[in-house]
Image (cartoon, grey):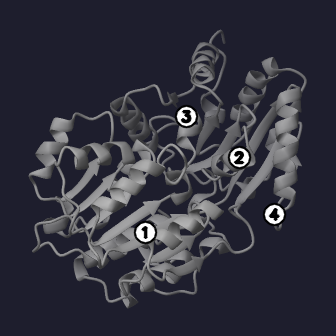
Amino acid sequence: MAFTSARDTRITTDDVKGSGVLFSSLGLKQELLMGLTQEGFQQLTPVQELAIPHILARRDVVARAKNGTGKTGSFLIPILQMVNPAKDHIQALVLLHTRELAMQTAKVAKTLSKNMPDVTGRIMCAIGGVSIAEDRERAREKPLVVLATPGRLQQLIDEEILNFRDCSIVVLDEADMLLSQNFIRSIENCLAACSNKRRQTLFFSATFSNSLKEFCDKHLRDPEYVNAMQDSLLLRGVTQYVCMLKEDRYKLKLLSLLMKHLKINQCIVFVNSVQRCEALYRSICDEFRVPCLYTHSRMSPEERSRIYDNFIHGQARLLIATELFTRGIDIRMVNVVVNFDTPLSADAYLHRIGRSGRYGHLGIAITMVAGDNEKRRFLTIDSYIQGQANSMIHILPKDPSEIPLDLYDASVVDSDIIPHLSDAIRPRNS
């Protein structure tokens, strides 16, 4: 969720700067406005300016915006404004494609509604990997807002644990992913269960395919199309670099060099497989004394949630992750992203580097390329990036410390938690 925060003095780029509209001008409930203010959020981002008035007017909306520019707030704020705690049925459903994104979005909803005691306690997050008995227990509390992954939601509907007949708002976040072959059948079934004829349906996505257009035509009523993409899918605050290596074995040495010479607030290192994730974690632990975490899809939801929370709260500056972590996850202190493995597609590349430079802040993304397969993939990515306005991938300097600090905003808000990686890293045998 990206807002302009009064408590964060770092530079913000134009793609998250709206025209100066204040949340206080929207006529929001005092308790909701208080929650926004207490979190330091004052002004709307461009996508929020475009989408929120239509949503509050009960219009169906299809919104396009870059990741990290405020899409989450665009639907959560209107939902919290419109729910009526005097009623005992589910009023809003938010569908999300990963457990992490669902948990994160639920956490944001509860934070913003913390001054609304009759609402915040009735926000339910339903995800796979958690005991269905726990969901049964939460269902007895008469939730007003449900945030769920498709598989678990389908189970809750099939077992009649939750009833969505009177649900008046349905949101598909990262709609392009939710309408992929992995989820489309569950999504169709879930929308059918939300049979309220006056249902308001909201789609949010960075990309807009023909299949998404067809789905909108089928399920939305005269929607308002909102486009806050501006000139490029890329966040303006992210400066991109590439380093061509002779062999894959040199990547760990380069990563060590980056950690020594860059002023890293927090860094996410992306790899292409679970095996690679665990192997890189072991290598880093064996060779360097660096606070490090790792996460991938084969971990339990509880493990992944714990690691996510630990990283957010600064228990490590370095997180190794697979593609699971590329969409929607907001960690405001990440100012460096490293593609240890070249992404498999341009789309994956965009979502990975979008973990840096969020909230309109500055960051850098460094891609390592070794071997013919990675070179071919990188050429495809580079060709795509060159087609984006004001975008290019630079050659990484031989001395990474030559990267100007003002490109990646190395002003650490919570530097007292752990030292910079450049101060912490040293070989085990030193």
Position above or below: 85 against 22 = above
Kindly report which numbered mark, 3 or 1, lies closer to the viewer in this rendering.
1
Q: Are marks 2 and 4 in contact (CB under 8 Å)?
A: no
The C terminus sits in image quarter: top right
- Residue type marked 1: Gly
Q: Residue at x 82, y 61 (%)?
A: 391
Kindly report which numbered mark, 2 or 3, lies closer to the viewer in this rendering.
2
Residue 72 sits in which quadrant? bottom left
Give the labeled residue for mark 2: 349
- Spatial CA distance of label 2 from label 4 is 13 Å
Describe the element under mark 3 as helix, strand or loop. Answer: strand
- Spatial CA distance of label 4 from label 1 is 26 Å
Q: Residues within 10 Å of mark 1 (few under 14, many from 20)?
A: many
- Spatial CA distance of label 4 from label 3 is 29 Å
Kindly report which numbered mark, 4 or 3, lies closer to the viewer in this rendering.
4
Camera-side residue of 129 and 67: 129
Give the labeled residue for mark 4: 388
Residue 319 is labelled as 3
Q: Position of residue 340 (x, y in %)?
A: 71, 32
- Residue type marked 4: Gln
Q: Earlier in the sequence, mark 3 or mark 1?
A: 1
Camera-side residue of 333 and 304: 304
- Spatial CA distance of label 3 from label 1 is 26 Å
Position above or below: 272 against 57 = above
Give the labeled residue for mark 1: 73
Kindly report which numbered mark, 4 or 1, lies closer to the viewer in this rendering.
4
